[in-house]
Image (cartoon, coloured by chain):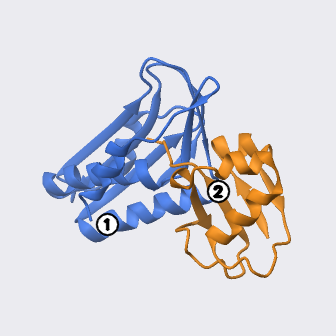
Amino acid sequence: MNRVQTEDFDINDEIAALTEGRSDIGAVVSFTGLVRDVTLTLEHYAGMTERELSKLEADANARWQLQGVTIIHRIGTLHPADNIVLVVTASKHRKDAFEAAEFLMDYLKTRAPFWKREGDEWVEAKDSDDTAAERWK
Amino acid sequence: MKLLYFASLRQKIGLPEEDVDVPAYVRNVADLIDWLMTRGPGYEAAFENRKLIRAAIDQEHAKLDALLGSPKEVAFFPPVTGG
């Protein structure tokens, strides 16, 4: 499941939604990205973003044995300490959930069409993000 | 052809999107960029550094040598910075 939204998300609610009524999940890993220090405005390419996030989800499901995936990314104006992004993975055993969560974040940062602006300045992409994504090839 | 521009490219070009009739010689993404750069200083500034241009054909990432075909939309944007 993936969503792009302006409003905040609640990690506990999202984990509960993924695990409720199931007895086949032995591990849940969550990653939350927060805004550091500055006020950011995020824009995205509506339509392509959802396609890319769905593809990432399908890729992760093909590579690891997962019982569930949730990706939520916020857009609009965000302030220091606000949530930006959430990835939750659920699996039978911890290794799949840990690795899939890291893979999803690395790929999201290099493929999902979001752009951050700080005041009038667009944030520049980092080479280290490309390097992080490369290792999953 | 519908063109979409995002982030710094949109600002430099001054438009979020436009419909254009492209000349017949424009076959791939790089050709389209070459042609767009003849359309004014905003386009020139936007496409000046090709290393920092990313493109998508019908919402799929596309390399500069990707053939355009008959797309519904082509988008141009800088490297993504989400997450």
Type of amino acid at the residue the image marks with label 1 = Asn
Task: Left or right? Give the position of A87 relative to B37.
Answer: left
With respect to residue A90, does A57 lie above or below? below
The residue lying at 56 percent from left, 75 percent from top is B66
Type of amino acid at the residue the image marks with label 2 = Phe
**Numbered tag placed on residue B20 in the rendering:** none
State the SS at label 1: helix
Task: Left or right? Give the position of B10 relative to B62.
Answer: right
Quarter in which the C terminus of chain B is drawn = top left
The residue lying at 47 percent from left, 57 percent from top is A53
Q: Mark 1 lies on which chain?
A: A
Q: Which is in the foreground here, disc 2 or disc 1?
A: 2
Residue B42 placed where, x, y %? Answer: 77, 45
Between residue B54 and residue A107, name the one nearer to us: B54
Task: Left or right? Give the position of A103 relative to B67.
Answer: left
Image chain in blue: A
Q: Callout 1: few (<14), some (14-19), or many (20+) C-alpha neighbours within 10 Å?
A: some
Q: In which quarter of the image is residue A76?
A: top right
Q: Callout 2: few (<14), some (14-19), or many (20+) C-alpha neighbours within 10 Å?
A: many
Residue B28 placed where, x, y %? Answer: 64, 75
- Residue A70 visible to the viewer: yes
- Same chain under badges 2 and 1? The reply is no
Image chain in orange: B
Q: In which quarter of the image is residue B76?
A: bottom right
Residue A88 placed where, x, y %? Answer: 33, 47
Q: Which chain carries label 2?
A: B
Residue that mark 2 sits on = B76
State the SS at label 2: strand
- Alpha carbon distance from label 2 to label 1: 29 Å
The residue lying at 48 percent from left, 42 percent from top is B82
Residue that mark 1 sits on = A61
